Amino acid sequence: MLNNPTILQKLAQRPEYNALFLNVIERSCYQDVKMIGNSVRIRDRISGAYLFSVGTWQELEVLLDNTRGNMNTFMINDAAFTKEILKKYPKVFTREYRSFVLQQKDYLPCTKIRKGVEIKPLDLSWLSFILERYKDVEFGHESYISDRVLYGPGLGLLYQGEKAAVALQHKDGETGPVIVDSRFRGLGLGTYLLRCFNKLLFTDNTIVISLVKPKNEASAHMVMNSGYKPTEHNVLWVYHELVKRKQ
């Protein structure tokens, strides 16, 4: 656990605002931790991304300016500072996400037994299923998905003996992606699988977070049905050298 209890206490005062930070700390994969005023910087060792919790813009700017190492990708937990970021880094690409958080105390257990449904741990036999259905420019490639299948928690769902859905965890601790085959959508399988996956995630964490693109109402509906609650602020991911690849 974090050696500086003051930083942990500061983050824990606003658990929903700082959910991803608390998640990273609980999994003991944090580096380069620094606090200025009410703002905190943490580098996630697994993903390599920097995470910034904002108190004020002035505090955030100091943390940004004295960060050493790779700043190709970083996250700010309040998208209200998008204009300031674009003014400071005019050539970056930004992406805003809606934030949904589930705390262990609010966990909804998956008690319903679904006929014809079987939950399985993931292995590489699921790789082609995922790659054929997850067409994401940033994450939908074999090296990343293979890593998540092998080293991250993950579950697969069989429906009447067929591969129907998977749930993975991103390297930085975000819940997702949750992928449901188009043939089996509308049956509630994604929500069912995610509730089962939440139980697995709470093995290592007391708080989990899911980030959803603003117009993806289907995913937002699924995560809320599995217990996640929308937070007050959207988060902002910022990319430097990855701009061309992401456009």
Image (cartoon, rainbow, N blue to C red):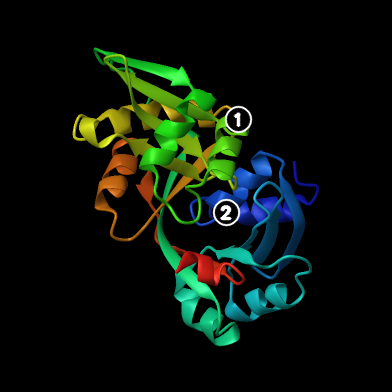
- Label 2, secondary structure: give it: loop
Q: Residue at x 29, y 54 (%)?
A: 216
- Label 1, secondary structure: give it: helix
Q: Nearer the viewer, residue 128 or 60?
A: 128
Task: Say whether residue 227 is visible.
Answer: no
Where residue 15 sits in the image (x, y, percent)? 53, 50
Mark 2 neighbour class, 10 Å CA radius: few under 14, some 14 to 19, many 20 or more = few
Where residue 153 sits in the image (x, y, percent)? 55, 30
Task: Say whether residue 69 is visible.
Answer: yes
Q: Residue at x 26, y 13 (%)?
A: 116
Q: Is residue 167 above or below residue 232?
A: above
Q: CA distance from mark 1 to mark 2?
A: 34 Å
Quadrant where the N terminus lies? top right
Residue 159's quadrant in the figure? top left
Where residue 230 sits in the image (x, y, percent)? 36, 52
Amino acid tagged 2: Gln
Amino acid tagged 1: Leu
N-term mark: 1 or 2: 2
Mark 1 neighbour class, 10 Å CA radius: few under 14, some 14 to 19, many 20 or more = few
Where residue 83 sits in the image (x, y, percent)? 48, 82
Q: Residue at x 54, y 44 (%)?
A: 170
Q: Is residue 76 above or below residue 154?
A: below
Q: Nearer the viewer, residue 38 or 159?
A: 159
Q: Residue at x 61, y 64 (%)?
A: 73
Q: Nearer the viewer, mark 1 or mark 2?
A: 1
In the picture of the structure, the residue carrying the numbered disc 2 is 13
In this rendering, the count of numbered labels is: 2
- Farthest residue, direction left: 186
Q: Which mark is residue 150?
A: 1
